[in-house]
Image (cartoon, rainbow, N blue to C red):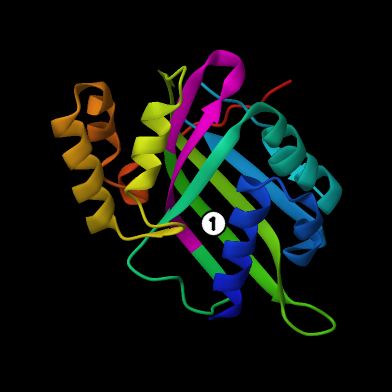
Amino acid sequence: MSTRQLLLERYVEAKDLVRPHLMRRIYAADAVLTFSIATDSITFPGRVTGIDAITKTLIVDFGATYSRCKTFYVCDAPPRDTGQITMLPWLVLMSEPTRACMRIGKGYYEWSFQPRARGGMQVVTMHIHIERMDAIADADGHLLRTAQSVLPYPWLPPSVMRSQLGTLAETAPALAFLKDFRSPIDPAALGSHSTSSVSP
């Protein structure tokens, strides 16, 4: 397993399972996190600096609002070991209990890495683009369970996503919304319409 792959898998573990203690094994102390958001359905600060603030944003605050989260990296194979990962598509499926709904979203990640003083690698910058983050009524959690159950986690080949979500959308009327998420985001097609949404 590559060092970058390990860091990306550790990030998903920290965020999806709400394990803030893992963050210092992923990020540099002075790491920078930025967001671009093309939807009004969710907000994050535009820029977050430092491991403590990043942990609060991505793990503590996020985990207080959302649960049963699964974040998928949509690619045919984990990225190779380079200093930078550019525009890696993602899909997220999670619950928002206070609204009795599931959330389904897609976008892309960008990461840059540097060596640690004592060996290994760490994340120094991370960008999260959120293109969609739809809210779907799901009081009993059945839709979320069904959608999550058919997808390999966390590495999700685009062909598998297309096939599995397409089949669910066609065979279960309540899951018809999945047809809009069968394909990963195409960063090259975004152009200038991606906008930043910054919370107070």
Q: Is residue 76 magenta?
A: no
What residue type is disc 1 on? Answer: Glu
Determine whether, in the image, residue 32 is placed left or right of residue 53: left
Counting from the top left corner in percent of width and height, residue 194 is at 45, 35
Is residue 39 in view? Answer: no
Taking the spot 47% from the left edge, 78% from the top edge, the residue there is: 80
Q: Is residue 103 magenta?
A: yes
Taking the spot 64% from the left edge, 62% from the top edge, the residue there is: 10
Which region shows up in magenta? 86-105
Determine whether, in the image, residue 43 is placed left or right of residue 86: right
- Residue position marked by numbered label 1 in the rendering: 110
Identify which residue, 92 or 50, lies in the foreground. 92
Q: In which quarter of the image is residue 166?
A: top left
Counting from the top left corner in percent of width and height, residue 123 is at 69, 64
Residue 44 versus residue 81 in the image, above or below = above
Taking the spot 53% from the left edge, 79% from the top edge, the residue there is: 81
Q: Quadrant of residue 57?
A: top right
Looking at the image, the residue that sits furthest to the left is 170
Main secondary structure found in the magenta portion: strand
Is residue 147 in view? Answer: yes
Determine whether, in the image, residue 83 is placed left or right of residue 38: right
Q: In which quarter of the image is the C terminus?
A: top right
Counting from the top left corner in percent of width and height, residue 126 is at 63, 54
Counting from the top left corner in percent of width and height, residue 4 is at 58, 73
